[in-house]
């Protein structure tokens, strides 16, 4: 499955870069008057940029089919890189095509908004980047107390304002309006994306009420929720949680699920208070109304498709959460767990491990401080055929073990890490 996933991810990139802009390019190029042939290339730059911005907006609506295809973390990376590429092409378009009046103003205003949002998003919405550039991560940590979760989400929605200005900008250009085939593609695509976006803003998901809110450690709370409808998630999944009646918690935030789906329609979350949203969760009260959207994630899909003879789960800190339900949901598969944390109090759910230890096909090592290479090598053993390694934890840890496991002789298709840094 992991080989297939890489193929699908490559296909998604090819589609985004080449296929999505193609109808815009072909119709515009075919209908553009010879008078404007000298500006054809920069006009096409602007057209491609617009098609990529529409795609970025669509990805931002979190389509579940796209999550199951390539995973939301990969989709959001595509979203971010496409947005930056679109701004680059928009700059080339802006500097090379002459315009005046309202046409120029709408183009300039939209570009200025995109530039501002790109700088903001590089810090607050690009976990794939901030996890690699420590300076950006430091800036984010310094500003998070000002730009809180809900404010960040609303600022990010200025992308719609900027894209609307581009839409008006195009409609104001007479020689573009005359190209009927292009305008058909332009209007239909814009209408589809904007409709999808508006629908995504409507309160969606399954209503739930809070049964319990328990403090597990000084910085981690367990929420137990009860839904009115059947939950559609798999072991290892995460959901988007919001509280529509609580200020500061109205915008959805992703959290991994502790438990496997059950007939009681219960969902258990363990939430560490890292940001303003997660810290405010500690104040949620019994019977408070919540909305749950999900599940999302690919851990169980990887297991189902790979059909491993043995699982090795490597977890660090709060990264154990999605792996807990995988242990419960795959009892027939031999499982080894290596679970570490910086301190003893953050080694979560020790009672679960004690219970699982009664299984004949389950072994675990739980310790304070990271595992060394020899410890992991000893668990890998000599027979690595049909072994699948799943990793949960901080980005630095995940990338480290992916690199090491490949050196230990595992194929990339035997390792899966769902990076939760976006």
Image (spheres, helix red, strand yellow):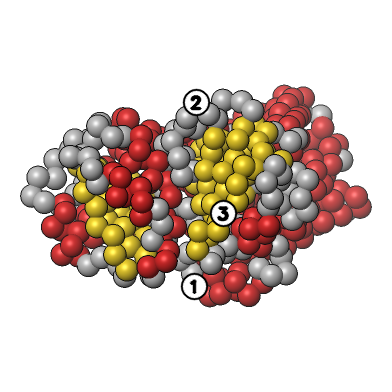
Give the image location of residue 109, x and y in percent.
Answer: 82, 56
Residue underneath mark 3 = 214
Report how far apart the C-alphas of labels 3 and 1 lie in the structure. 33 Å
CA neighbours of label 1 inside 10 A, class few (<14), some (14 to 19), many (20+): few
Measured as percent of width and height from the top left, residue 363 is found at: 21, 49
Q: Which residue position is annotated with label 1?
A: 134
As rendered, which of 159 and 145 lies closer to the eye?
A: 145
Residue located beneath label 2 in the image: 263
Instruction: Tell me the residue at 54%/65% (across/down).
Output: 219
Give the side of residue 160 with respect to residue 413, left or right: right
Q: Judge whether residue 396 can be spotted in this image.
A: no
Mark 2 vs mark 3: which is more N-terminal? 3
Please report whichever mark, 3 or 1, sits nearer to the chain's N-terminal start.
1
Q: Secondary structure at mark 2?
A: loop
Q: Callout 3: few (<14), some (14-19), or many (20+) C-alpha neighbours within 10 Å? A: few
Query: Are the residues at dot 2 and dot 1 in contact (C-beta closer than 8 Å)?
Result: no
Circles 2 and 3 in contact, beta carbons < 8 Å: no
From the viewer's perspective, is residue 257 above or below residue 99? above
Label 2 Cα neighbours within 10 Å, binned few <14 / some 14-19 / many ≥20: few
- Front residue of this view, candidates 25 and 116: 116
> Helix, strand or loop at disc 3?
strand
Residue 377 percent across, percent down from the top left: 15, 58
Locate residue 372 relative to residue 197 in the image: left or right.
left
| 81 in relation to 387, above or below | below
> How far apart are the two marked residues, 2 and 1, measured between alpha carbons?
44 Å
Secondary structure state at the residue bearing disc 1:
helix
Q: Nearer the viewer, residue 26 or 301?
A: 301
**Quadrant (top left, top right, bottom left, bottom right) of the N terminus:** top left
**Quadrant where the C terminus lies?**
bottom right
Q: Quadrant of residue 230?
A: top right
């Amino acid at each position: 499955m992991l080989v297939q996933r890489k193929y699908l991810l490559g296909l998604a990139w090819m589609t985004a870069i080449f296929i999505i802009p193609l109808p815009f390019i072909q119709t515009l190029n075919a209908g553009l008057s010879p008078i404007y042939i000298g500006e054809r290339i920069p006009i096409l730059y602007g057209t491609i940029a617009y098609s990529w911005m529409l795609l970025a907006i669509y990805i931002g609506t979190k389509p579940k089919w796209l999550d199951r295809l390539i995973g939301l973390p990969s989709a959001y990376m595509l979203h971010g890189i496409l947005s930056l590429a679109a701004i680059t092409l928009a700059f080339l378009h802006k500097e090379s095509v002459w315009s005046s009046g309202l046409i120029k103003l709408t183009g300039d205003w939209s570009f200025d908004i995109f530039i501002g949002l790109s700088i903001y998003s590089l810090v607050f919405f690009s976990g794939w980047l901030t996890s690699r550039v420590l300076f950006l991560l430091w800036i984010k940590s310094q500003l998070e107390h000002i730009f809180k979760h809900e404010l960040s989400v609303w600022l990010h929605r200025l992308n719609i304002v900027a894209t609307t200005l581009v839409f008006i900008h195009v409609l104001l250009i007479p020689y573009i309006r005359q190209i009927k085939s292009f305008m058909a593609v332009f209007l239909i695509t814009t209408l589809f994306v904007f409709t999808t976006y508006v629908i995504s803003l409507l309160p969606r998901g399954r209503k739930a009420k809070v049964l319990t809110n328990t403090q597990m450690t000084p910085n981690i709370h367990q929420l137990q929720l009860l839904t009115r409808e059947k939950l559609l998630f798999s072991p290892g999944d995460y959901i988007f949680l919001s509280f529509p009646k609580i200020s500061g918690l109205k915008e959805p935030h992703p959290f991994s699920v502790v438990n496997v789906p059950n007939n009681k329609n219960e969902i258990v979350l363990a939430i560490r208070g890292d940001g303003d949203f997660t810290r405010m969760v500690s104040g949620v009260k019994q019977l408070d109304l919540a909305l749950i959207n999900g599940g999302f994630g690919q851990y169980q899909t990887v297991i189902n498709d790979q059909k491993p003879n043995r699982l090795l789960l490597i977890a660090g800190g709060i990264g154990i959460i999605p792996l807990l339900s995988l242990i419960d949901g795959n009892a027939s598969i031999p499982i080894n767990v290596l679970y570490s944390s910086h301190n003893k109090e953050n080694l979560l759910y020790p009672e679960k491990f004690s219970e699982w230890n009664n299984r004949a096909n389950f072994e675990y090592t739980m310790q304070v401080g990271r595992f060394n290479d020899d410890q992991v090598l000893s668990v890998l053993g000599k027979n690595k055929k049909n072994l699948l390694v799943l990793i949960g934890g901080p980005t630095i840890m995940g990338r480290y073990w992916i690199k090491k496991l490949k050196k230990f002789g595992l194929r990339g298709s035997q390792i899966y890490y769902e990076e939760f840094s976006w």
